Structure formats: structure tokens, C-alpha cells
Amino acid sequence: EVQLVESGGGLVQAGGSLRLSCAASGFPFDDYAIGWFRQAPGKEREGVSCFSSGDGSTDYADSVKGRFTISSDNAKNTVYLHMNSLQPEDTAVYYCAAEWGPCRDSTWYSDLDEYDYWGQGTQVTVSS
């Protein structure tokens, strides 16, 4: 059974930090890219960051560059999203998703249909 399980969300004050985890199982982790997405109330789901398990390459949305870092523990089939300097506009449900192959250069953040598997999401709330 394929599973992507997010954890680590919560309530944090502006300027604070959180680390989200995405634990994957049921598919060959090293052959897939893991993307982090978020969806705020009334808004479309948007790409935040992507990690290619095969070569370790990463990519970020402009809105989080310099604040968020994506990393992986391949031995645990887990991808992390380290979020620093959080702002109220970062408030959203955060999802991880898996697509076969590497992160696609121009579409990883926008083409949600590329992704084969999705987690259930974890809420991140940043208070001002």
C-alpha cells in the first residue's frame, strides 16, 4: 500500500520555525521526486519545493527561497521541509506528493496532475 504521511505542522508565531516530515512507503522511493505543496483557504494549491531522490537536486518557489530548505533521509524514506522565518502568509495545509522521475524543471510546482501519490496534509498556522 502506497502511503505518504505528513507530520510536524502546528501553530507558530511569525518569525518562528517548523520542520515538516513526509514519510513515504509502498513505492521505490529512490525513483521518485517528492514535492511539497500548500493550500491556503480560498486559494489554489501551490508548489513550495521539490526534491529529486535520485540525484538529490532541489528546487523552490520564489516565495520561500532563502527561508525553506528541503532535505531527505533516504534510509528512512522521509523528506523534510525546514521552514524558517515563517510569516502569516505561510499559513496553509501543507501536502507532500510523489512523482516518478526527477522534479520537472518547469512544471514541478504547477502541474499537480504529474504527481502519482498525495498525502493527507498537515496544517501550518502562523500567527502575527
Image (cartoon, rainbow, N blue to C red):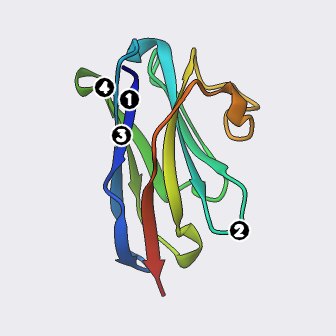
Q: Nearer the viewer, mark 4 or mark 1?
A: 1
Disc 4 marks which residue? 77
Image position of 72 with respect to 9: above or below:
above
Disc 3 marks which residue? 5
Q: Position of residue 10 (x, y in %)?
A: 34, 67
Q: CA distance from mark 1 to mark 3?
A: 6 Å
Answer whether labels 1 and 3 touch (C-beta < 8 Å): yes
- Which quadrant holds the N terminus? top left
Residue closer to the observer: 87 or 123: 123
Q: Amino acid at mark 2?
A: Gly
Q: Amino acid at mark 3?
A: Val
Q: Is residue 85 visible?
A: no
For marks 3 and 4 on the same chain, the one whose residue lies earlier in the sequence: 3
For marks 3 and 2 on the same chain, the one whose residue lies earlier in the sequence: 3
For marks 4 and 1 on the same chain, the one whose residue lies earlier in the sequence: 1
Secondary element at tag 3:
strand
Q: CA distance from mark 4 to mark 1?
A: 11 Å
Secondary element at tag 1:
strand
Q: Position of residue 6 (x, y in %)?
A: 37, 45
Residue at figure coordinates x 23%, y 27% from the top left = 76
For mark 3, does the 10 Å Cα neighbourhood hold few (<14), some (14 to 19), or many (20 or more) residues?
Answer: some
Q: Amino acid at mark 4?
A: Asn
Q: Position of residue 69 (x, y in %)?
A: 44, 48
Disc 1 marks which residue? 3
Q: Amino acid at mark 1?
A: Gln
Which label number is shown at residue 42?
2
For mark 4, does the 10 Å Cα neighbourhood hold few (<14), some (14 to 19), or many (20 or more) residues?
Answer: some
Residue at figure coordinates x 71%, y 68% from the top left = 42
Q: Nearer the viewer, mark 4 or mark 2?
A: 2
